[in-house]
Amino acid sequence: MKLEVLNTSGQKTGKTVTLDDTVFAIEPNDHAIYLDVKRYLAAQRTGTHKTKHRGEIHGSTRKLHRQKGTGGSRKGSIKNPLFRQGGSIFGPRPRNYDIKVNKSTQRLARKSALSYKAKENGIMVLDAIAIDKPKTKDFAGLLKNLNLVGKKTLVLIPERNDNVFLSSRNLEKANVQIASLVNTYDIMNSHNVVFVGNAHEMVTELLKK
């Protein structure tokens, strides 16, 4: 698959790149995408929720009254879960929500997601992004030149660039990532994927292992 390389003004540079068919033109596997997106979202959960059971409540363990003869129910201590401010019964405990998905399945999911974007003509290639200092207006102008205003856009850059990161941070639908860290969820959650420089080669090399 061949694509025209654009500049930041949205004009063709006369150069073309060829996307590897083994990454950008496979038969998408929907189940692999589902598993990898589920794994990613589960990993975002901290799992630190917790309630105190009766053994962790501060209070006396003295028996409230004698076992029999009061006409009332039997009560062991003030920490009884049935009392106000007593311990919780089967409350949430700290846990890990991580889901294991094989690395080969994760690679298949990313290739499937990129293949979907290629079929939908949702992939673009830029020669470079030159932003001298963090300025949201400059990045917004870039999106306007590429006709991507109002569209969820994933911009993949070959290496860390703080000026680009900071310039895009206040734009709700713009997401800038280093190409080597791309994941299935962000690809599927965007309308367009923009590769900058040789970012597409980095992704191809990563997914062909």
Image (cartoon, rainbow, N blue to C red):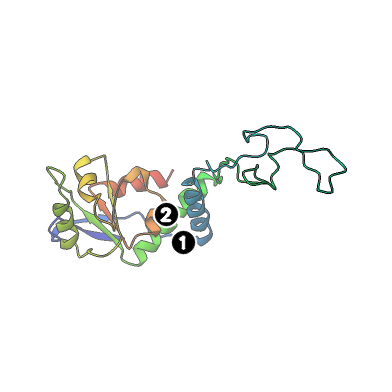
Residue at 63%, 34% in the rendered image: 56
Q: Nearer the viewer, residue 57 or 206?
A: 57
Quarter of the image containing the N terminus? bottom left
Q: Which mark is residue 67?
A: none
The amino acid marked with disc number 2 is Tyr
Q: Classify mark 2: helix, strand or loop.
A: helix
Image location (x, y in percent) of residue 139 = 17, 53
| Image quadrant where residue 143 sits | bottom left
Tell us which disc is closer to us: 1 or 2.
2
Mark 2 = which residue?
185
| Image quadrant where residue 68 sits | top right
Q: Is 178 placed left or right of 69 in the picture?
A: left
| Image quadrant where residue 93 sits | top right
Q: Nearer the viewer, residue 108 or 66?
A: 66
Q: Nearer the viewer, residue 197 or 181?
A: 181
In this rendering, the answer to whether 193 lies above or below 78 is below
Residue at 75%, 38% in the rendered image: 64
Image location (x, y in percent) of residue 179 = 32, 46
Q: Which mark is residue 28?
A: 1
Residue at 53%, 59% in the rendered image: 31
Image location (x, y in percent) of residue 91 = 63, 46
Q: What is the C-alpha distance between the residues marked 1 and 2?
A: 15 Å
The first of marks 1 and 2 along the sequence is 1
Q: Is 110 placed left or right of 5 in the picture?
A: right
